[in-house]
């Protein structure tokens, strides 16, 4: 069934809904400048007339069943509320209800309400609630948000549902961070105070010498002009690339992650090549358990499914409506007949759910993790149903065909896991990947501890402090590793530090008398490239493996011209640069546009070119986030780099 694999990239929807966040610090766009231009009542009503008629004549469920009473009430609401000239933002929040009422994740209006201020609080909406994911301002990692703007969790979900076309609550929770950090949405939902602040109520875990307890705290938060926070869910990512795989021989496990389903072409060929290499190592090492990680995969196109199936030993496979799925050619030399798993989350969407439904319903794989952000038999997005509104010119996506599951299975609002493993508040605190731990326990029943691996760069003769804390965090700016130890005390047996690749060589460390901190000294004689492994037994059932790579990587020298050119020389050669992560800001902290960034002189230096000239006498700042510079050894720099420089000529 060729029609089944015709998917427009769901990335379009993700990009549209994230355009606000993609370049927060860039110059104001023309769209933003015009976002407050007034639209007339006549213009807006014609756009509403158009989309109501379009839905009625193009959306497969409406064609088959007609509008429900609830949907007709929504249509009436939209018409009644177009009673005055409005800005684009105001009109969006009204007409977008027509898309949201369809409860269809592939029905999206491509306009994001423009905003200049943000609620800078990083959080993720887990099964147990809204959890803050990092320390920021007065908030602590692990804090549970009870209300925003005096609205409870259930009230917030109801508000989000008015503006997000979705098939389940899991996708609404995934979209919550994008929406509830935007001033435009906060204003529309009436979550802001008259002075522009937002009231946040949280539940915090505390402890004293006698016991642990929880207390409720109230905060009044001012909005900021940018989002400085990051949501770092505890998901194993050895690489920042969109493809990653590795073999764990001790656990009889092979892991493969890919973060989108590309169409046929260059990216598909790249993914296919990596898949071939992956299975080559699987067979070579006689691995009996393989896992595909699509927890951050929002969809795309399906051809790689055929490549995956070509390596698996299967019986007859069915796609939608019991039709045989035979678009793949089995490998003649060897087929994998061990256990196959897929890791899922609410970010697994569109083609991720389509492909996994075929695999799961045909009992080819088992799933581990959390419910997907889309239901198994979602409506297909194919040809001929997308268009644009005649007056605003806003483009939209619309599904075009009803879908069924391969097997006669009761309808579900999500593709629920065979082995349910939810990320918890404690996982956030401990950076513990619950789904990977469960996967490793399945493939290696003797495994008792969840091993968490991190890598950092250190300079010779540098001191590293290990500190007992409520959460796990590596702060290399302050040379501190925060860990939660059992009984809140660091014991000698908890720490094992040795040189990798040679005979074990212990490094000197001392534990403070109060057992709250330990200090490690990196030997001054350590050579660049040497690796030390710190193994720490912290909280129960978690063992942290922190690999220290001796590397004195820094900006050694630089030059510039007033015309916006800069040349930076590093302490060692570099291979590549993630241009979009670099930030150059002026004396007021305003980011400047970077027109070009490239590695020159065979890796000796980095050339930056700004779109504007420097002002002589002013001080500027360069910020290179960690994981931005690719080193010649294939790893990324693991430290933030800050540099202030004054323009002298």
Image (cartoon, rainbow, N blue to C red):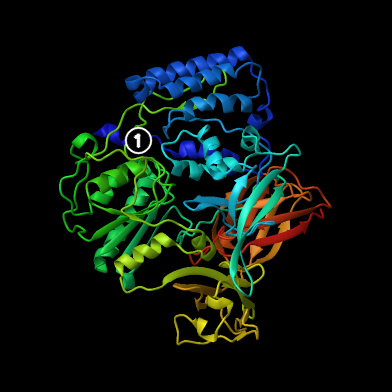
Q: As rendered, which of 149 and 196 lies closer to the eye? A: 149
Q: Give the residue at mark 1.
A: 378
Residue 498 percent location from the top left of the image: 50, 83
Identify the image quadrant of the N terminus: top left
Residue drawn at x 58%, y 76% as measured from the top left: 488
Q: Secondary structure at mark 1?
A: loop
Q: How many marks?
A: 1
Res. 491 image quadrant: bottom right
Res. 41 image quadrant: top right
Q: Is residue 82 rendered to the left or right of residue 218?
A: left
Residue 285 percent location from the top left of the image: 27, 69
Position of residue 90 relative to residue 314, above or below, is above
Res. 90 image quadrant: top right
Q: As rendered, which of 38 and 171 lies closer to the eye? A: 171
Q: Does any portion of residue 193 appear in the rendered image?
A: yes
Q: Is residue 430 rendered to the left or right of residue 24?
A: left
Mark 1: few, some, or many residues within 10 Å (few <14, many ≥20)? many
Q: As rendered, which of 76 and 473 lies closer to the eye? A: 76
Residue 277 percent location from the top left of the image: 31, 59
Q: Is residue 92 rendered to the left or right of residue 363?
A: right
Position of residue 142 relative to residue 538, above or below, is above
Q: Is residue 73 rendered to the left or right of residue 40?
A: left
Residue 603 percent location from the top left of the image: 57, 61
Q: Does any portion of residue 274 appear in the rendered image?
A: no
Residue drawn at x 51%, y 75% as measured from the top left: 538
Position of residue 552 relative to residue 491, above or below, is above
């Amino acid at each position: 069934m060729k029609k089944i694999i015709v998917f427009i990239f769901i990335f379009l929807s993700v990009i549209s809904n994230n355009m606000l966040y993609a370049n927060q610090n860039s110059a104001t766009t023309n769209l933003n400048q015009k976002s407050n231009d007034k639209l007339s009542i006549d213009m807006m009503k014609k756009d509403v007339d158009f989309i109501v008629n379009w839905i009625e004549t193009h959306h497969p469920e409406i064609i088959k069943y007609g509008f429900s009473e609830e949907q007709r009430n929504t249509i009436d609401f939209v018409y009644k509320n177009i009673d005055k000239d409005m800005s684009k933002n105001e009109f969006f929040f009204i007409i977008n209800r027509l898309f949201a009422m369809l409860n269809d994740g592939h029905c999206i209006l491509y306009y994001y309400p423009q905003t200049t201020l943000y609620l800078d609080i990083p959080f993720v909406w887990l099964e147990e609630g809204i959890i803050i994911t990092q320390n920021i301002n007065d908030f602590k990692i692990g804090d549970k948000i009870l209300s925003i703007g005096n609205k409870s969790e259930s009230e917030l979900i109801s508000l989000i549902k008015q503006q997000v076309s979705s098939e389940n609550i899991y996708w609404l929770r995934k979209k919550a961070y994008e929406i509830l950090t935007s001033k435009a949405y906060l204003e529309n939902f009436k979550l802001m105070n008259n002075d522009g602040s937002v009231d946040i109520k949280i539940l915090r875990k505390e402890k004293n010498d006698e016991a642990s307890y929880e207390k409720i705290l109230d905060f009044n938060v001012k909005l900021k002009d940018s989002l400085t926070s990051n949501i770092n869910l505890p998901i194993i990512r050895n690489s920042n690339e969109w493809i990653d795989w590795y073999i764990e021989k001790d656990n009889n496990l092979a892991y493969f992650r890919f973060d989108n389903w590309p169409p046929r072409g260059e990216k598909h060929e790249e993914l296919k090549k990596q898949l071939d290499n992956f299975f080559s190592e699987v067979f070579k090492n006689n691995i009996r358990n393989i896992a595909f990680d699509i927890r951050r995969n929002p969809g795309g196109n399906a051809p790689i499914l055929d490549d995956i199936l070509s390596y698996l030993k299967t019986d007859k496979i069915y796609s939608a409506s019991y039709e045989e799925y035979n678009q793949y050619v089995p490998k003649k030399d060897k087929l994998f007949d061990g256990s196959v798993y897929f890791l899922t989350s609410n970010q697994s969407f569109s083609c991720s759910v389509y492909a996994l439904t075929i695999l799961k319903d045909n009992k080819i794989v088992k799933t581990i993790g959390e419910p997907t952000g889309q239901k198994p038999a979602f409506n297909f997005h194919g040809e001929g149903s997308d268009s644009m509104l005649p007056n605003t010119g806003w483009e939209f996506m619309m599904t075009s065909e009803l879908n069924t599951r391969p097997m006669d299975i009761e309808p579900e609002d999500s593709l629920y896991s065979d082995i349910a493993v939810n990320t918890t508040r404690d996982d956030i605190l401990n950076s513990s990947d619950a789904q990977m731990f469960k996967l490793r326990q399945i493939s290696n029943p003797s495994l008792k501890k969840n091993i968490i691996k991190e890598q950092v760069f250190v300079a010779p003769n540098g001191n590293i402090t290990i500190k007992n804390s409520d959460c796990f965090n590596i702060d290399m700016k302050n040379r501190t590793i925060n860990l939660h130890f059992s009984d809140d005390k660091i014991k000698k047996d908890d720490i094992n530090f040795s040189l990798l690749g040679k005979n074990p060589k212990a490094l000197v460390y001392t534990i403070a008398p109060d057992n709250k901190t330990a200090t490690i000294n990196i030997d001054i004689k350590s050579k660049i490239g040497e690796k030390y492994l710190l193994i720490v037994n912290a909280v129960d059932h978690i063992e942290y493996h922190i690999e220290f790579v001796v590397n004195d990587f820094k900006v050694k020298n630089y030059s510039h011209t007033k015309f916006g050119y800069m040349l930076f020389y590093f302490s060692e050669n570099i291979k590549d640069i993630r241009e979009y992560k670099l930030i150059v800001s002026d004396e007021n902290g305003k980011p400047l546009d970077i027109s070009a960034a490239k590695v020159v002189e065979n890796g000796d230096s980095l050339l930056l070119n700004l779109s504007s000239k420097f002002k002589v006498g002013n001080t500027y700042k360069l910020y290179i986030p960690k994981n931005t510079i690719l080193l010649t050894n294939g790893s990324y720099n693991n430290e933030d780099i800050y540099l202030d420089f004054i323009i002298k000529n």
